[in-house]
């Protein structure tokens, strides 16, 4: 099986892997939309659209009836009747024009509110605590979720609206005009072997057979289009991510003279996208043979079908044109599926991607600790870790390594702790496990119930917002006095930025690495956490800067600080207790009681004197 076939296979089975058939996808997303604040507006617009569609169909029915007197007047060369019928057409035509404009507007507004409800719902579910980060560990869903949140949500809302309106309109047209066709051809008969054979409503059956054949062929020819569309969305997202990542890191790429290498990677992404588009182009071309062929044939098909009745003298010329118009309406309604096969394929692909994305988001809360890790709450103001083992990948994977705590660890309120350990113990696993976002491990991590717990990764996030918002993040800056902002900026050595508090910038690009670290400390001083977990925060900074920032951390007197990593500046300034970590290979025997006792003794020795 080729790489392309594997990709298509993954996209096809994506929904099935999460227990979502096509009908369940529709029900799942309809239930989600029903719970959004936009529901009432969408329902009101849907009722209004139905009224407009019914009125439009009635006007089209009257226009079809108008064919009889109009073409009969032409056949009789009756000028007065001809002019009268032109006036009738002006009234019907202007009414249809107005109805079409209103329907188009309502279509766009309905799509807008559907997108509002869908996009806000997806973002709310995505940014619930820890979900977005847990999503990174899901193989297919964790890749470019922005594509599903933005482009897929937009396509789904717009296509759902246009296809639903088209389907309802086609259904009403079919019901309305199938009666006209039946009445025109209900007396059709022909002689065969001297016997008169009558086929009631034969034009109806002819239209059904004609449209049914077109739909069948379209379904056969375009059966792979939904999967190809899903694959294209995924590859387009990867290309956009590659371009964005290159742009974000263009300074480092230029300094490394790496434009050629990076160009090759981006060009490779473009090649993959073009390969999928090429397959889609072939699929659409094959589909055009069917849709265009039946479309052109429909120019003469209704006349040929109605000709026996007309030449038998059972239809006037006006009646013939009315039959042709009714046939085209019925055929147009029946071939709605053919005309919209591309859009339906696109819609099914986006429905699958959005519904499975939302399903996975909801399922992430079923195992909040991930794997065998448990997160009970302590009744006391302390952090306790019991029997913790963390793995670098899913248990059972070959060469799975990680770390373990050789004995129970208890961290008290206001205590300062720094990790120590043997070579090979990946300390960063402990940081993510404490945050509840690492999926593979076992044991218990009992977090404190009192006070705010803040986790500070090595590479922090500075929102694209005003400096005031950045310093207060994630708190409401409106609840913090200006003097407080001034004080913390001065304390961390960023007093020149006081004048820029209301300035919106890309602060992650505007500031140097050192100033970004200072700004993150200003954020801590504003938040005043009760518990602070740092992931090698001081790594990479100049030694004098490390000592300065460590001194600021030491001022958080009532804050328990756990430093995941090794920092001489942190150790010298805060004199923390060292917590030992051991490297782990999955499946190895646990440490013996003797070693546990020895480790415990070491821990007590390393606890500093009060």
Image (spheres, grey):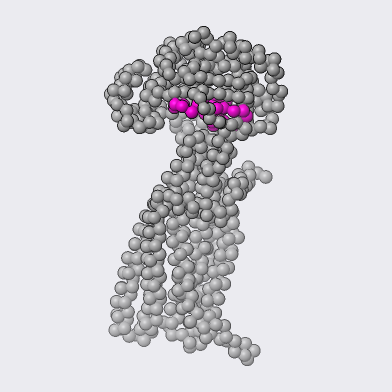
| Residue 372 placement: quadrant | top right
- 569 and 399: which one is in front? 569
Give residue 559's position: percent from left, percent from top. 44, 20
Query: Is 427 located above or below residue 156 in the figure?
Result: above
Give residue 578's position: percent from left, percent from top. 55, 14
Q: What residue is shown at x 58% (from left), y 12% (from top)?
A: 604
Q: Quadrant of the N terminus?
A: top right
Please, which residue is most extreme toward the top here? Answer: 609
- 171 and 4: which one is in front? 171
Please give the range of residues in magenta.
428-453
Q: What residue is shown at x 48% (from left), y 28% (from top)?
A: 449
Please, which residue is most extreme toward the front here? Answer: 379
How many numbered marks have been drawn onto this rendered protein structure?
0
Whether residue 537 is in magenta: the answer is: no
Give residue 2's position: percent from left, percent from top. 65, 44
Give residue 9's position: percent from left, percent from top. 62, 47
Query: Is 17 located above or below residue 573 in the figure?
Result: below
| Residue 310 visible to the viewer | yes
Whether residue 433 is in magenta: the answer is: yes
Q: What residue is shown at x 32% (from left), y 69% (from top)?
A: 95
- 361 and 317: which one is in front? 361
| Residue 250 visible to the viewer | no
Query: Is 566 located above or below residue 352 in the figure?
Result: above
Please, which residue is most extreme toward the bottom here? Answer: 194
- 295 and 157: which one is in front? 157
Q: What residue is shown at x 58% (from left), y 20% (from top)?
A: 409
């Amino acid at each position: 099986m080729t790489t392309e076939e594997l990709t298509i296979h993954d996209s096809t089975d994506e929904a099935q892997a999460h227990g979502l058939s096509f009908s369940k996808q529709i029900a799942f997303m309809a239930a989600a939309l029903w719970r959004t604040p936009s529901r009432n507006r969408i329902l009101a617009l849907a009722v209004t659209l139905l009224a407009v569609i019914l009125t439009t169909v009635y006007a089209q029915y009257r226009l079809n009836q108008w064919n009889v007197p109009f073409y009969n007047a032409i056949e009789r060369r009756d000028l007065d009747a001809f002019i009268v019928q032109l006036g009738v057409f002006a009234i019907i035509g202007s009414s249809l024009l107005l109805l079409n404009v209103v329907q188009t507007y309502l279509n766009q507004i309905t799509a807008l509110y559907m997108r509002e409800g869908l996009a806000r719902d997806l973002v709310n579910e995505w940014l619930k605590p820890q979900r977005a980060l847990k999503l990174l560990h899901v193989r297919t869903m964790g890749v470019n979720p922005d594509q599903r949140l933005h482009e897929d949500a937009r396509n789904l809302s717009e296509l759902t609206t246009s296809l639903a309106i088209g389907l309802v309109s086609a259904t009403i047209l079919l019901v309305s005009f199938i009666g006209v066709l039946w009445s025109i051809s209900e007396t059709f008969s022909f002689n065969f072997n001297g016997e008169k054979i009558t086929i009631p409503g034969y034009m109806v059956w002819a239209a059904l057979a004609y449209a049914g054949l077109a739909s069948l062929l379209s379904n056969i020819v375009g059966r792979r289009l939904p999967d190809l569309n899903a694959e294209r969305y995924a590859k387009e997202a990867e290309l956009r991510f590659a371009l964005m990542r290159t742009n974000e890191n263009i300074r480092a790429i230029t300094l490394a003279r790496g434009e050629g290498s990076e160009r090759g990677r981006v060009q490779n992404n473009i090649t993959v996208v073009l390969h999928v588009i090429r397959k889609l182009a072939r699929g659409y071309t094959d589909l055009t043979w069917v849709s265009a062929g039946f479309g052109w044939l429909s120019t003469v098909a209704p006349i040929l079908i109605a000709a026996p009745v007309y030449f038998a003298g059972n239809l006037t010329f006006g009646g013939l044109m009315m039959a042709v118009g009714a046939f085209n309406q019925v055929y147009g309604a029946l071939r709605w599926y053919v005309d919209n096969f591309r859009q339906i394929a696109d819609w099914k692909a986006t429905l699958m991607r959005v519904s499975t994305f939302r399903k996975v988001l909801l399922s992430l809360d079923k195992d909040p600790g991930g794997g065998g890790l448990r997160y009970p709450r302590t009744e006391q103001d302390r952090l306790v870790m019991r029997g913790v083992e963390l793995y670098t990948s899913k248990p059972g994977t070959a060469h799975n390594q990680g770390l373990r705590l050789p004995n129970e660890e208890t961290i008290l309120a206001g205590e300062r702790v720094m990790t120590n350990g043997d070579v090979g113990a990946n300390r960063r696993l402990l940081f993510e496990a404490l945050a509840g976002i690492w999926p593979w491990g076992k044991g218990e991590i009992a977090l404190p119930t009192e006070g705010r717990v803040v986790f500070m990764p090595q590479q922090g996030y500075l929102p694209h917002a005003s400096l005031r918002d950045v310093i207060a993040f994630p708190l409401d800056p409106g609840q913090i006095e200006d003097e407080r902002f001034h004080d913390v900026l001065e304390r961390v050595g960023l007093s020149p930025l006081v004048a820029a508090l209301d300035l919106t910038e890309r602060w992650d690009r505007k500031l140097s690495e050192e100033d970004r670290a200072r700004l993150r400390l200003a954020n801590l001083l504003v938040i005043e956490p009760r518990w602070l977990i740092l992931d090698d925060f001081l790594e990479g900074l100049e030694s004098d800067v490390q000592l300065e920032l460590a001194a600021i951390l030491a001022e958080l007197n009532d804050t328990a600080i756990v430093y995941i990593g090794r920092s001489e500046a942190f150790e010298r300034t805060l004199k923390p207790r060292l917590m030992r970590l051991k490297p782990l290979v999955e499946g190895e025997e646990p440490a013996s009681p003797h070693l546990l006792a020895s480790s415990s003794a070491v821990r007590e020795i390393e606890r500093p004197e009060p």
